[in-house]
Image (tube, rainbow, N blue to C red):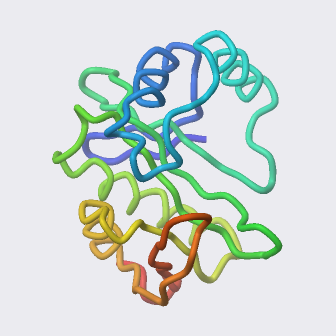
Amino acid sequence: MEIETGRLLLREHALEDYERFWQMMIDPIAKKYTGGITTLSYEERKKKFQNDLETGNDSDELELAVIEKNSGKYLGYCGVRRMKNSDNYEFLYGYCQDSWGHGYATEAGKAFLDYMFKHFNQISYFATSDLNNTASVKVLKKLGFKRKKKQEELDYIVDLYILEKDEAN
């Protein structure tokens, strides 16, 4: 599966993505709002990455690498995963810190969500954002997500957002 925009290619992850993916996974600033730094070693995480490549996405998750077309550089990922105990899906993304501030998250997110609404039966997608992650909130709003409510997630509070198919930008 591939999705193309003016500057980006969204495709399945490849082994050549791993080095930049790993750097993102151990960057405390890049991972501050997305689950924290991995606790796995380089080799353990690489084995998991390779296993994910071999088994592919399952029906509960679809995650694509975001690649800058001109350079071929891995920028990050975006995707969806089924929310726990629900038929709803959560939109998610993460980017290498040197990719921030260029509009990649919005560009990739719009193309990805347009594709998902067109090819799958979901009528809405959810997203969460830490209250302090103002950059992510801006991206979600640009994509058309509307704040629904606050909810407690483990030991922090996030805002829950929803994007309805008929309201997608």
- The quadrant of the image that shows the N terminus is top right
Dividing the picture into quadrants, the one containing residue 38 is top right
Apparent side of residue 52 relative to residue 77 in the rendered image (left or right): right
Q: Nearer the viewer, residue 64 or 31?
A: 31
- The quadrant of the image that shows the C terminus is bottom left
Dividing the picture into quadrants, the one containing residue 87 is bottom right
Apparent side of residue 115 relative to residue 62 in the rendered image (left or right): left
With respect to residue 145, does 80 lie above or below?
A: above
With respect to residue 92, does 47 lie above or below?
A: above
**Residue 120 percent location from the top left of the image:** 68, 68
The residue under the point 26% across, 21% down is: 71
**Residue 88 percent location from the top left of the image:** 70, 75
**Residue 166 percent location from the top left of the image:** 48, 89
With respect to residue 11, does 108 lie above or below?
A: below
Q: Residue furthest top?
A: 43
The residue under the point 51% across, 85% down is: 164
The residue under the point 17% across, 45% down is: 102
Q: Residue furthest front?
A: 155
Apparent side of residue 90 relative to residue 97 in the rendered image (left or right): right
* Count of all numbered marks drawn on residues in the image: 0
The residue under the point 73% across, 29% down is: 52
